[in-house]
Amino acid sequence: MPLLSVKNLTKSFGGLTAVSNANLTLNKGELVGLIGPNGAGKTTVFNLLTGVYVPSSGSIELSVGDNVRKINGLKPYNITRLGISRTFQNIRLFKDLTVLDNVRIAMHQNVKYGLISSFFRLPSYYREEQEVIKKAESLLEIFKLDTKKNELSRNLPYGEQRRLEIARALATNPSLLLLDEPAAGMNPNETAELTDLIDWIRKEFNLTILLIEHDMSLVMKICERLYVLDYGMIIAEGKPEEIKTNKRVIEAYLGEEVPHA
């Protein structure tokens, strides 16, 4: 049973079709890349998978335990509770919260205390909050951010903000992690470290990962399969070594040579 099954997914904005009859399948534990030229519709796919957009047609099915759930039209917070978490192409941290609080806030969907315990500050509230802080600090240590836990997230360097966003996504305890250009704006050393980190967290947290990325060195190193999107349509699917020699993919990225007159 696939973890995620996307069938004939289409999204239109008025007369513009941003995604057209896209079909994707992710099996549990896979690390799959979604690549394509700028404007191909990659982030739109992520927005459909996470409930930011409602599909015009098609279906999105997620395996939750022994059941398959159709998640079309669900609110983003409901989809997060079912096990999908994401980062964003443009970093969207809570800039005026501390590094620690950015991670803590993502964990609160899983706390067991209720409104009464929270309002009256009952012992169960304090026990749960201490456990949340402990888990959040452990995540920050993995991402080498524990020494900056009390800093405002807006004050972190760009590369550390990227790492914090991934840590926050992991804090929701997902089964499927969507990474939207995690290496954007990073230097080669940071990208190399991130590549190793993504591969490590996939194994350590037993995750399935779908990755959008323009850095082909990262994509070719860690992705097991690739889907290629162009003008909203999937034009190729296969292993990295197959994709990099695919004629349609090369034309999509580099353009087709115009014959001489």
Image (spheres, rainbow, N blue to C red):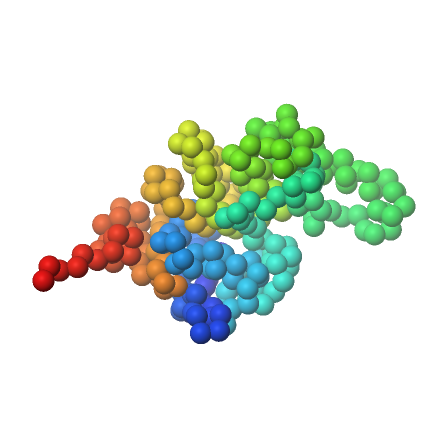
Instruction: Indicate the quadrant containing the C terminus: top left, top right, bottom left or bottom right.
Output: bottom left
Q: Position of residue 76 (x, y in %)?
A: 61, 58
In the displayed structure image, the side of residue 56 where residue 241 appears, left or right: left
Q: Position of residue 10 (x, y in %)?
A: 45, 69
Circle count: 0
Residue 4 visible within the image: no
Residue extending farthest left: 261
Residue drawn at x 77%, y 39% is: 129
Q: Position of residue 230 (x, y in %)?
A: 35, 60
Res 216 → quadrant: top left
Residue drawn at x 64%, y 28% is: 148
Res 141 → quadrant: top right
Q: Position of residue 42 (x, y in %)?
A: 43, 56
Residue extending farthest top: 147
Residue extending farthest right: 120
In the displayed structure image, the side of residue 202 where residue 34 appears, left or right: left
Residue drawn at x 64%, y 57% is: 77
Residue 37 visible within the image: yes
Work out whether residue 221 or residue 123 is closer to the camera in this orientation and state it: 221
Residue drawn at x 53%, y 39% is: 162
